[in-house]
Image (tube, helix red, strand yellow):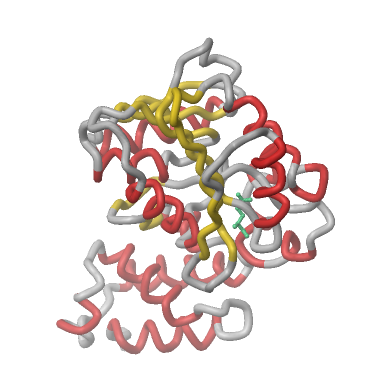
Amino acid sequence: MAHTLEQAIAAGADLLALSSESAKLDAQVLLLHILQKPRSYLFTWPEHALSDEQQSQFNVFIQRRLKGEPVAHITGLREFWSLSLEVNATTLIPRPDTETLVEQALEIALPATAKVLDLGTGTGAIALALGSEMPNWQITAVDRVSDAVALATRNQQRLAINNVHAKQSNWFSELHGEKFNLIVTNPPYIESSDIHLNQGDVRFEPLSALVADDCGMSDIKQIITQSRDYLSSNGYLLIEHGFEQGEAVRHFFEKMAFINIKTVKDLGNNDRVTLA
Ligand code: GLN
């Protein structure tokens, strides 16, 4: 007998219970993706009977998830801010923590037509969230990896956020003295010895987007140092970092003669972004 939506989710969540901390949510997201239905469908039609094809596709997805593959890689999509972004294994999967950075950027008093730079844009998440909120900002989104630039460009085009332009650049290498009112970045900042790299979704993400030398500080230091040549006067640099790196980041900003340095906590009450 065919499973209903509700039964299939319960069975999927049971299977995932030992391997995922979000078993029920994972099962819901995977099945809704197969049905191409919004979340509200879970409550409006739980007795929807799955076709054989839907059930077998769901079984395949649950097996992939059991092997640890991130839900976002199975569906090829991830929600960030108010946007549904295409994701794949070439970049980091956007995290809710990074929405703290977007919120903070939107609170800065900037000129109406501010020029903004997103370094290491990956899927384009930060740049596109800012572009969707601030249609008059001119946003440049760069990544060292050409596949990431292509992914960010596809997201930009599909969402028709036309004030964001993605291009290839290794941090500032292709920016040739352009000046920005705001530079934002979620660079790699994890120490290579961090045990969390062996757990969960990160095992399926590129290390180059996660890991940095010098206790995870090397890219952050390089960006702080070089950004001085790319900020307009009274410009801001806003950086995401690890929850134990707030003090080190503030200290390095001071060393590089930045002022008005402020660290902001994420939803989990951990230091997450620093503005200067
Ligand atoms: N915050 C992410 C994690 O802990 C890492 C993001 C990054 O390195 N920029 O998985």
Quadrant containing the N terminus in the rendered view: bottom left
Q: Residue at x 36, y 45 (%)?
A: 108
For image coordinates 40% across by 26% down, the residue present is 140
Q: Which of the 4 quarters of the picture holds residue 242?
A: bottom right
Percent coordinates x, y for residue 254 in the rendering: 67, 41
* Residue sticking out furthest to the left: 44
Task: Report the front residue among 221 and 276.
Answer: 276
Residue at the (74%, 45%) spot, across then down: 217
Picture coordinates of residue 136 (x, y %)? 21, 31
Q: Quadrant of residue 44?
A: bottom left
Residue 243 higher or lower than 274, as above or below: below
> Left or right of 23: which side holds 247?
right
Does residue 178 lie above or below 19 as drawn? above
The residue lying toward the viewer, choosing from 4 and 208, is 208
Q: Position of residue 243 (x, y in %)?
A: 64, 63
- The residue lying at 79 percent from left, 65 percent from top is 195
